[in-house]
Image (spheres, rainbow, N blue to C red):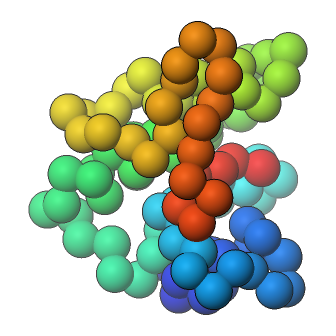
Amino acid sequence: MVSQQALAERFYGAKPPTQAYVCGLYDDETQTIFLPDECCPDDLLNQSTLLHELVHHVQEATGMVYPCSAARERLAYEQKIGVRHPFFFWEEKWVSDPNFAYWSG
């Protein structure tokens, strides 16, 4: 688990937006899941975030190939645990709040 600042910098670069919040990240190269320090194992959103990032790990570990990152994300977002994610798949387009990030890279 890492600080929210470290997550935001990993996702956005050296100068993340002030209001940015990153729920979790998966690093393909190191096969590492990063979650924020404040992550609570009893919280449904945090459980869903971990599941989302675990899906990315399975995708990477099994060599799954996707035509684009949105196709890869779709499978991960379909594995939610009864919570509404900050990204919504609508008519084949990703719509997101720019200050709230889920990403695997």
Q: Eyeballing the image, is 95 above or below 64?
A: below
Q: In this view, does 31 lie to the left or right of 45?
A: right
Residue 5 higher or lower than 53, as above or below: below
Q: Residue 10 in the image: x percent, y percent?
A: 75, 73
Q: In which quarter of the image is residue 14?
A: bottom right
Relative image position of residue 59 (x, y in whole percent)? 65, 27
Left/right placement of residue 39 relative to residue 37 reads left
Q: Furthest-left residue in view?
A: 42
**Residue at 48 percent of width and 31 percent of height:** 88
Q: Where is residue 26 in the image (x, y as percent from the top left)?
A: 64, 53
Give the image quarter of residue 33. Answer: bottom right
**Residue drawn at x 30%, y 39% as measured from the top left:** 84
Number of marks: 0
Q: Is residue 25 visible?
A: no
Q: Which residue is drawn at 71% across and 33% down?
A: 60
Q: In this view, does 45 lie to the left or right of 33?
A: left
Residue 80 vs 12, above or below: the answer is above
Q: Where is residue 101 in the image (x, y as percent from the top left)?
A: 58, 58
What residue do we see at 53% from left, 19% from top?
A: 90
Q: Is residue 82 visible?
A: yes
Which of 62 and 50 lies nearest the eye of the viewer?
50
